Image: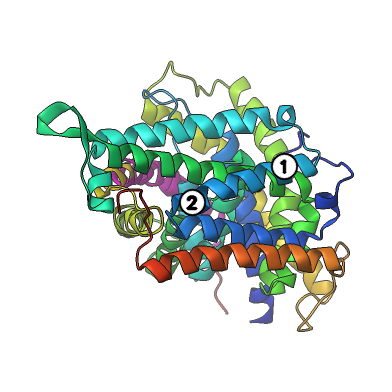
Amino acid sequence: MKNNAVKSIVAIGIGAALFFVCGRFIAIPCPIPNVTINIQYGVLAFMSAAFGPIVGLLIGLIGHALIDFSWGWGVWWSWVFSSAIFGFVMGCTKKLYGLNDGEFGTKQIVRFNVSQLIGHIIAWGIAAPALDILIYAEPASKVFLQGIVAGVSNIVTTAIVGTILCVAYAAARPKKGSLKEE
Amino acid sequence: MQNLFNYISRKSPIHELTGATKLVCLLLWTFAVMITYDTRILIALPVIAFILFGISKIKLSDVKFMIGFTLVFMVLNNILVFLFSPEHGVGLYGTCHQLLPLWGGKYLTAEQLWYHLNLVLKYLSSIPVILLFVCTTQPSEFAASLNKIGVKYSVAYSVSLALRYIPDIQKEYNDISKAQQARGIEMSRKVSLVKRLKSASTILIPLIIMSMDKIETISNAMELRGFGKNKKRTWYMARPFTKRDILSMVFCALLLALSIWSNVSRGTRFWSPWM
């Protein structure tokens, strides 16, 4: 267990750095001007699936807060918390798709995507707008639209990037039960 | 490597404050700004913030880019709020002074303009302080200060690891991206969105696998050095508080108290000349 604690700390640090680099420097052009696609949520979903809820929560929290700091516009806490919530939800369902067991077939892909769908809906459909209204007193229709746009784009990127990452990572892991005592 | 967090080393009273003080002040200040819509406070805060900016010897030209970026963000946000809910202010302030007819039977109201003024003031009160924090706090001191304000040292260490590995991962990303582009990976506007995402994944896979190896190596190294054995640890970059630190924190705490008091005593977060 002790080993796991140190590993989680490192996973949070490296995960937050990955989240930061993906969110800050990898800009994939998108049809709408000035909007870039956030592939960091694919990475976050993957890291949470590999390391669990607490790691996911803190990667979202630290990574997103660092991105906001580096832009200098101030930390938009409501959205930072939503990233953390998404990481947490993905981590909670970790057992369902056993990423570390080296198997990631159709069944696991479906489970992974259902949980990411639920995670994104909770984060961007409920938590982000609710916190925006609570903290910043912005009009409900505006924050819900923003949340839905962000949510849909994040669901699409997580579905593609997250799934590809999980499949590739699982393929590189030794399969559960591949070694037998004779 | 470019200076990501824009730390600018100068000699000024604000630079001399410890990182923990600046972090506490930043949190108190932003909370004070966040909870109130009292215009009188929101006018005072930017004035103080700009005075502090002057004291810090950070020039506007140093942070030109970030300010420009934030201003665009602010304008866009205001436009969005207005388009979605042109009579939002009426609901918030409970009075209605119609100025001009708009679309769909809605009116441009004085309350709406007042609400937008407050939004802008909120930005103006928080932007300078955040820039000040980012420009005057050394990233490595940041982790130490997190621990000092009560964040568990394991979490503070994660932040410090993240700051340490961002340049490395950025460099690795660039290397992998160039290698993949040489093999014909396309990420520009020429191909479809799904294809772009798939291309991004081909860069991310090696990056993730490398990072997972890195996690293994670093956690083993930390384990060997006995990380996590004790309840407390010391920080190379930590400094003791001075009188000035205490004064700054008290000042920011008073600001927060004022902001809370203004809300509680009047029973509402909002303030307008018509109320």
- Structural distance between the alpha carbons of marks 2 and 1: 21 Å
Q: Secondary structure at mark 2?
A: helix
Q: Does residue B69 appear left or right of residue B212 in this picture?
A: left
Q: Is residue B58 positioned above or below A48 on the image?
A: above
For marks 2 and 1 on the same chain, the one whose residue lies earlier in the sequence: 2
Q: Residue at x 44, y 60 (%)?
A: A103
Residue B252 picture quarter:
bottom right
Task: Looking at the picture, tell me which residue is in the foreground, A73 or A179.
Answer: A73
Q: Residues within 10 Å of mark 2 (few under 14, many from 20)?
A: few
Q: Which residue is mark 1?
A: B53
Characterize the magenta stretch by its predominant secondary structure.
helix
Q: Which residue is mark 2?
A: B40
Q: Does residue A66 appear left or right of residue A40 in this picture?
A: right
The chain under label 1 reads: B
Q: Residues within 10 Å of mark 1 (few under 14, many from 20)?
A: some
Q: Is residue B91 positioned above or below B73 on the image?
A: below
- In the orientation shown, which residue stands out farthest toward the front? B274
**Whole-percent x, y for residue B211 in the image:** 65, 51
The chain under label 2 reads: B
Q: Which residues are magenta?
A: A147-176
